[in-house]
Image (cartoon, rainbow, N blue to C red):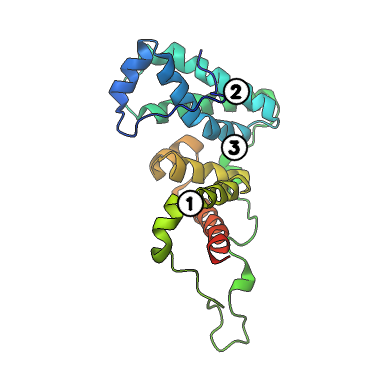
Amino acid sequence: MPRPVGSRHVTLAPTTKDDELLARLRAGDETAFEALVAQLYGTMLMVARTYVKDRAVAEEVVQEAWLGVVQGLDRFEGRSSLKTWILAILVNQARTRGTREARSVPFAALARDDDGPAVEPERFRGPDDPYPGGWRSFPADWSAAADRIVGDRETIRVAMRAIAELPPTQQTVIRMRDVEGYSSHEVCGLLGVSEANQRVLLHRARSRVRAALERHIDG
């Protein structure tokens, strides 16, 4: 059974195709399993925690989902991407466990919560200003710093820390969209949210991460 990777860092080549990866998984390629688990584990844990209260229970749900993946590999027909199929198994496991743990609130209900503005109100001009609602100071010129942002490990750590500090629903959506590359259609289908809710959650999450990066870049 696949397990989370510890100190050994394993990654999947970005050109790996689903059919090639599937063949390796069905052949019992442990390295491929470990790489896939390492890639998806954080997102799967985040999704599981929207259905169950305790992190330890969420980790059990993720392990149960991976067991379901192993047992179902031969039945996978490729009607969706491999990652979408794996997340669907995880969501089904999490919903079942959430009901058993007496926490059956659907993700869609949590997604309607308003946790405040995505960008600090003080960054905009007040109602008595000649230009109410405008930026007090414009964000940094990201295009000029693009190369530094991509190559700066500390900047990447700032972004990942900002994601980790997001509310659970926002963190789940931004991880799925911007870290794992799921489409908006896939996210809506897997989490049971409307396109509008998904857009709002993603906008809020991206705005907060962007604000954290601006503070880091502007010094």
| Residue 211 locus on image (x, y percent) | 56, 61
| Residue 113 locus on image (x, y percent) | 63, 51
Look at label 2 and name its amino acid. Answer: Val
Q: Nearer the viewer, residue 159 or 102?
A: 159
Residue 113 visible in the picture = yes
Q: Are marks 1 and 2 in contact (CB under 8 Å)?
A: no
| Residue 138 locus on image (x, y percent) | 50, 74
Does 86 appear above or below 129? above
Label 3 crowd bin: few (<14), some (14–19), many (20+), radius 10 Å = some
Residue tagged by mark 2? 61
Location of the C terminus by quadrant is bottom right
Q: Are marks 2 and 3 in contact (CB under 8 Å)?
A: no
What separation in Å lies between label 1 and label 2 (alpha carbons)? 35 Å
Look at label 3 and name its amino acid. Answer: Pro
| Residue 194 locus on image (x, y percent) | 47, 46
Q: Secondary structure at mark 2?
A: helix
Does 200 appear above or below 61? below
Does 23 appear above or below 99? above
Residue tagged by mark 1? 152
Disc 1 vs disc 3: which is toward the camera? 1
Disc 1 vs disc 2: which is toward the camera? 1
Look at label 1 and name its amino acid. Answer: Asp
Q: Secondary structure at mark 3?
A: loop
- Residue at x-position 40% and y-position 20%: 32
Label 1 crowd bin: few (<14), some (14–19), many (20+), radius 10 Å = few
Q: Nearer the viewer, residue 124 or 4?
A: 4
- Between discs 2 and 3, the one toward the N terminus: 2
What separation in Å lies between label 2 and label 3 (alpha carbons)? 16 Å
- Residue at x-position 48% and y-position 51%: 152
Quarter of the image for residue 73 reads top left
Does 188 appear above or below 196? above
